[in-house]
Amino acid sequence: MKFHTQLNPIKQLAGQTAIYGLSSIVARIINFFFVPLYTRVLTTGNYGLASEMLAYIALLQVVFTFGLETGFFRFANQDKDQAATIFSTTVISLGISSMTFLLLILLFTRKISIIAGHSATYIIFSALILTIDCFTAVLFAELRFLNKAWKFATFRSIKIFAEVGFNLILFFYLPKHFVSHPDSFLLKYIPPVPDYGYILLAILLSCITSLLLFLPRLTKLRIVFSMHIWKKLLIYSLPLMVAGLPGVVNDFISRIFFRFFAPSTAPWQDQLGIFNANLKLSVFMLLFVQMFRYAAEPFFFSNASRYDMKKVYADVMKYFVICCIFIFLGIAMYPEFFSLMLGKEFRSGIIVLPIMLIANVLLGMVFNLSMWYKLSGKTRYALAITLLGLSVNLFINIIFMPQYGYLAAAWGYLLSYLAMVIFSNHLSRKYYPIPYNWGKIILYCTTGIGIYLFSRYLCPIQLQYRIILNTSYFICFIVFVFHMENLNVQKLKMLFKQK
């Protein structure tokens, strides 16, 4: 009975992870299957330009949401009677800031286009994407706060399938349409031959679709703005905005650096395109981290008062790492199959795949560790953790990218998160001790990486024999984990069984 009681919070988290992750699963898998299209229709350079533009969008989205999603969770859970006022204040704040940003972009589009070297039209596409995404972020956050997991997943899925539909229309229908209709008004915005603007336009149209889904909710919104609540939200959330940057900055800042620091042996656009395409192959690891994150934040906040919650945090970290190492081995030991998803010009960068997989494991660990300062209210330490990670990333990229190119970008990402894990855990032990079982966590990580390295450098050259041996190694690792955790089928059923 005691074992069952202790597992209830983890069962709840597992159930919410599955639901919230549904839309993420659909998004990542479907977008993953667009990679073969992009890497076969677009050149490496054109795909590199798309990667750079999307990097700017991702970075600015973190900045212009101001961390208000997490702030909304924090104060709405603390005072549920004021949740409606807190939500309205957050919506109004993001609405004003988003529209102000869009207006500034429209006023200076021409100058930005000249400086950035991108089409003015594509600058506007990107600004609209950013504006709508920042505004709808808190609308999706409200669904998570209200535990409307299925509605959240449905709305996200609709947005995803809309993007799929628009991609299919733009890449497969429009080029043929332009041949027979050379005077089409669309040619004012996109060229007759697909380029990276087609990707941006598909995303923009899906964002508009997403916004339309929330119109019924917005029409019922009780317009209330509390200056007192707004100040509290900003004081709490702004440090978290900076803390949210590492997961995005450490991923995307290197892509921006390609323009300035990539080796001169090949155009930087080509190198960035190859790097980003191979980065997409780590989608399943990133998918698990993302779906876990969607469910974990509201779960941790709503259960913060439990007497045994620190023990639960520690267990969640351990099981999270175990799942991540399973995914790492399942992908890293079969690169021949995953590389076939890419066009031939992009496959030379497959070497970054295992590095990025481990980096994403560390990303998830950083999020787990971040709960100590979110729950204790010591969000000011997020800045120190973030600056350390950024410093490592900047150092690796600036010093080593001119010689090693996208390998430096991958290692910068990994080492940055490793530094953040070490430093965040050090601060946690000092201010909010959580009994993480670092002995087992490190054991599982080093064992998984060791198995990969052994399979990579000491296995037979023949593909069929290598696949058989790698599969046997993977099974051995599973048996090893079951033995170390004293798991059996009955305990697994108790862990994952839904009420």
Image: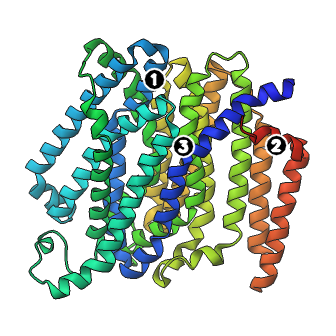
| N-term mark: 2 or 3 | 3
| Residue 77: mark | none
Question: Residue 380 shows which numbered tag?
Answer: 1
Q: In this view, does 278 lie to the left or right of 441?
A: left
Whether residue 445 is situated above or below residue 122 in the rendered picture: above
Applied colour scheme: rainbow
Residue 300 or 410: which is nearer the viewer?
300
Which quarter shows the C terminus? top right
Using the numbered discs, state the Cα–Cα distance from disc 3 to disc 1 in whole angstroms: 29 Å
The x, y position of residue 432, in whole percent, is 63, 20
Residue drawn at point x = 78 percent, y = 26 percent? 6
Horizontal and vertical percent for residue 165? Answer: 36, 66
Q: Nearer the viewer, mark 1 or mark 2?
A: 2
Q: Specify the quadrant that holds the N terminus.
A: top right
Question: Tag 1's secondary structure?
Answer: helix
**Mark carried by residue 493:** 2
**Element at label 3:** helix
Vertically, is 25 above or below 70? Answer: below
Give the x, y percent position of residue 360.
Answer: 58, 52
Determine the residue positioned at 85% across, 28% down.
3
Identify residue for label 3: 20
Task: Give 181 or 98, whichever is nearer the viewer.
Answer: 181
Residue drawn at the location 62% of the way across and 22% of the way down: 303
Tag 2: residue type? Answer: Lys
Q: What residue type is labelled 1?
A: Arg
